[in-house]
Image (cartoon, helix red, strand yellow):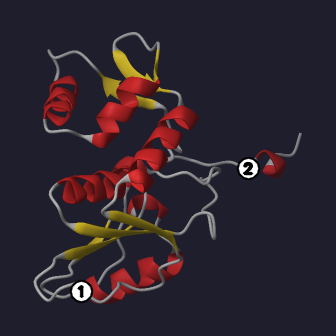
Amino acid sequence: MSANERHVTIVGGGLAGCEAAFQLAERGIRVTLLEQKPTRRTPAQHGDGLAELVCSNSMRGAALTNAVGLLKEELRRVGSIALACADEAKVPAGGALAVDRDIFSNLMTERVKRHPLITVKSEVVLSIPEATELSPVIIATGPLTGDELAADLASKIGQQLAYYDAIAPIIAADSIKW
């Protein structure tokens, strides 16, 4: 990497991390995407792919007459990888955009890994990577942030983060007593 070449490290291979990586790479910026799977998973994660939808396969309303539908159309028009893959993986869902989770994750994984400016590494990130002016870091781990990284983030910002919108109960079948 030359002294003036930008490089961004992104921690987290979910929707936000993959979208950020793809958008940066499409603009000529080299990206290293760090994803803990398959080395480690949270209880919600099951597959090895990127952008695994763990709670719902619905991306909510698709009509241009509502805010979420309009936002999706705006994202399509700016070249969103997530919306392109969702459109290919969609399943019938009335007025919503819902996807086949496996097809969606496979498409996202293949396209992100295929991009010549994106390097995907399976790595458990325990603390915020070093950032510089030419090599910034994006933390895009959301509610599935590993405990060690969450603790490091909390120590840097002075409080524990909470993801109220993303919280969904995960119950292991073997934990239920009949």
Query: Percent from the top left, x then y, of residue 155?
Result: 34, 89
Query: Percent from the top left, x then y, of residue 67?
Result: 16, 27
The residue tagged 2 is 172
- Towards the viewer: 14 or 152: 14
- Towards the viewer: 138 or 84: 84
| Disc 2 packing (10 Å; few <14; some 14–19; many ≥20) | few
Q: Reading the chain from its start, which is encountered first: label 1 or label 2?
A: 1
Q: Name the element at disc 2.
A: loop
Q: Tell me the CA gap for discs 1 and 2.
A: 38 Å
Q: Quadrant of the C terminus?
A: top right
Q: In this view, does 138 lie to the left or right of 105?
A: left
The residue tagged 1 is 131
Q: Which amino acid does label 1 sit on?
A: Ala
Q: Quadrant of the N terminus?
A: bottom left
Q: What residue type is labelled 2?
A: Ala
| Residue under the image location 53 percent in, 45 percent down | 54
Query: In this orientation, does residue 115 appear?
Result: yes
Q: Is residue 145 left or right of residue 20?
A: right
Query: Percent from the top left, x then y, of residue 81?
Result: 30, 41
| Disc 1 packing (10 Å; few <14; some 14–19; many ≥20) | few
Q: Is residue 68 left or right of residue 148?
A: left
Q: In this view, does 21 lie above or below 66?
A: below
Q: Is residue 43 above or below residue 119?
A: above
| Residue under the image location 35 percent in, 63 percent down | 118
| Residue found at the very far right of the displayed protein | 178
Q: Name the element at disc 1.
A: loop
Can you tell which of label 1 and label 2 is closer to the viewer?
Answer: 1
Query: Percent from the top left, x then y, of residue 104?
Result: 48, 36
| Residue found at the very far top of the displayed protein | 94
- Towards the viewer: 68 or 119: 119
